[in-house]
């Protein structure tokens, strides 16, 4: 199929006139394109199930091994403003869809490459940018037409989508375990009228020990902290009455600028007695309301608990968990049906949470505190994630987060499309046909946009060690014969019906990738000068 011919450079006036770019503007524009495409090239090798992993060494000498586009770009040092725009693009895709963070950057890099060639032919950047935005709207339309509507009650379909997301991760061999966990976690938060899910209501608790196979969805709440037993307190509590406190069970300290000097041992004894009496009174007030499990918020000003208070709490048979982080308070109060208590005098029965059992158990040499049988639970979910090291745990958490996001995408937009490069080739072919109905520079821009979309199947084939030219040519041929679901089967190294291989992805991942990448490219193209402010 012949492509629309490129507009020749000329001095003619009108819509097809050649754009005479000023040298300064040209330099700025090309500098932006080179910087942004460099970012795209960094993550391109990480695309797909056979993509390579990156080892990132942070400023604190921590090691991160991942192939997640958003994580890679969040941790690299991008100094150029255009490169930072691509980092923000990946972050925007992560927020909108949660998956496709590598694809969106690779696609944007390919679109910039296509735009660069057209700029060299003398086309105006505004015409290119506007044509690309029109082409992206058309691409979204074609993607929606080829999608398959789904129902959230169809658990098997949701698991297929989550499995496809996990197959491109380091933990792909555990996708049969993690995919059902992701689906169960999201579906538990759904109501009949849900159009979105707040992933902050799903908490992943990481514990070093065992393997990823020990990861589980917990019936109840799992805590990051362990039970404090230094004072001889209990590790297990049945018929628990739980208080979540935000005050300290230790003696008050003077202000920063003040000091108290005690030079008489009798006075010292009096101070210690006063401290014991003060703490004992607080512990008795807590016990008076029947509280037998105490969750204490972490304090930066003074010790949340000291040895004296732990001794008294142990005598009163109260189970203690300390160092609860400030950002955990909302989740725990929602999960346990209790209210945070800011002062010992504001204790009351209605602020307590109730559970059948709170206990600290050991699993694969890791201590885990579980709260089971909560009486008035909120709509929250706890996932216990286990692994042999911190590096494995971090990657497992990122992979599980992507799987959760995929299921959330299907809640927001309830449609699936094939994976394996099939939608990109299908849209590319339809856009090429549509370009022939247009005239002038717009037709050429649409054709260039269609060609740029082929970077996804080409990169998938390249990363799998296949011949990208042969694979993409066969894909085009199969799609021209009407096989719209023909995609790259990277496991077998050939082109096949990708739906039969159960390689599917949410429609929202593809549509948001197309829209966000095109918007970013259009923004970069319209920049003609970089100015520094003081």
Image (cartoon, rainbow, N blue to C red):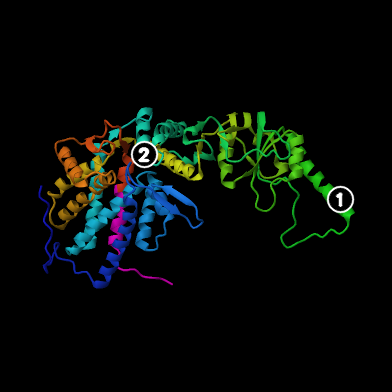
**From the viewer's perspective, is residue 394 above or below residue 11?**
above
Q: Is residue 525 magenta?
A: yes
Location of residue 402 by image quarter: top left
* Residue designated by label 1: 270
**From the viewer's perspective, is residue 462 above or below residue 370?**
below
Find numbered disc 1 in the image and state the secondary structure of the residue it sits on. Answer: helix
> Marks 1 and 2: in contact by CB < 8 Å?
no
| Residue 154 in sight | no
* Residue designated by label 2: 165
Q: How packed is label 2: few (under 14 Cα within 10 Å), some, or many (20 or more)?
A: many
Q: Can you say which quadrant of the picture contains the C terminus?
A: bottom left
Nearer-the-camera pick, 348 or 227: 227
- Left or right, 53 with reference to 292: left
Q: Which residues are magenta?
A: 514-534
Point out residue 372 in the picture as x, y percentages from the top left corner.
Answer: 59, 29
Kindly report the distance in space between the C-alpha atoms of the residues bearing marks 2 and 1.
Answer: 65 Å
Q: Earlier in the sequence, mark 2 or mark 1?
A: 2
């Amino acid at each position: 199929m012949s492509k629309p011919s490129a507009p020749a450079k000329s001095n003619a006036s009108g819509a097809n006139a050649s754009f005479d770019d000023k040298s300064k503007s040209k330099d700025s524009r090309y500098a932006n394109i080179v910087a942004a495409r460099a970012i795209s090239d960094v993550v391109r090798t990480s695309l797909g199930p056979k993509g390579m992993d990156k080892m990132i060494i942070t400023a604190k000498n921590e090691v991160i091994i991942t192939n997640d586009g958003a994580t890679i770009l969040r941790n690299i040092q991008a100094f150029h403003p255009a490169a930072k725009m691509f980092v923000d693009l990946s972050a925007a895709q992560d927020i909108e869809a949660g998956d496709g963070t590598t694809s969106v950057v690779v696609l944007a890099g390919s679109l910039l490459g296509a735009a660069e060639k057209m700029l060299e032919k003398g086309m105006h950047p505004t015409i290119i940018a506007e044509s690309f935005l029109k082409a992206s709207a058309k691409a979204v339309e074609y993607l929606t037409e080829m999608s398959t509507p789904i129902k959230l009650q169809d658990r098997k379909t949701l698991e297929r989508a989550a499995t496809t997301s996990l197959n491109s991760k380091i933990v792909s061999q555990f996708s049969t375990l993690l995919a059902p966990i992701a689906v169960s976690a999201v579906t538990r938060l759904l109501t009949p009228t849900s159009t979105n899910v707040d992933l902050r209501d799903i908490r992943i608790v990481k514990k070093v020990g065992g393997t990823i196979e020990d990861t589980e969805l917990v019936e109840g709440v799992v805590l990051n902290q362990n039970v404090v037993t230094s004072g001889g307190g209990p590790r297990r509590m049945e018929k628990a009455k739980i208080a979540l406190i935000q005050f300290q069970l230790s003696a008050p300290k003077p202000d920063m600028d003040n000091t108290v000097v005690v030079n008489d041992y009798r006075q010292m004894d009096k101070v210690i007695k006063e401290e014991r009496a003060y703490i004992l009174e607080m512990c008795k007030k807590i016990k008076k309301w029947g509280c037998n499990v105490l969750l204490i918020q972490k304090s930066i000003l003074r010790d949340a608990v000291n040895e004296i208070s732990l001794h008294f709490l142990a005598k009163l048979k109260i189970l203690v968990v300390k160092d609860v982080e400030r950002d955990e308070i909302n989740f725990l109060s929602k999960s346990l049906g209790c209210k945070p208590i800011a002062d010992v005098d504001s204790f009351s029965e209605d602020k307590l949470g109730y559970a059948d059992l709170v206990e600290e158990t050991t699993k694969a040499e890791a201590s885990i505190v579980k709260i089971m049988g909560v009486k008035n639970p909120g709509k929250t979910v706890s996932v216990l994630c286990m692994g042999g090291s911190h590096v494995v745990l971090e990657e497992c958490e990122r992979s599980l987060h992507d799987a959760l996001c995929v299921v959330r995408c299907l809640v927001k937009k309830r449609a699936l499309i094939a994976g394996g490069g099939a939608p990109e080739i299908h849209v590319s072919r339809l856009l090429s046909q549509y370009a022939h109905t247009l005239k002038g520079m717009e037709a050429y821009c649409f054709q260039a946009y269609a060609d740029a979309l082929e970077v996804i199947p080409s990169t998938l084939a390249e990363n799998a060690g296949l011949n990208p030219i042969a694979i993409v040519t066969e894909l085009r041929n199969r799609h021209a014969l009407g096989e719209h679901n023909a995609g790259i089967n990277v496991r077998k190294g050939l082109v096949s019906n990708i739906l039969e291989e159960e390689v599917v992805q949410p429609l929202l991942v593809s549509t948001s990738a197309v829209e966000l990448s095109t918007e970013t490219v259009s923004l970069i193209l319209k920049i003609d000068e970089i100015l520094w402010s003081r």
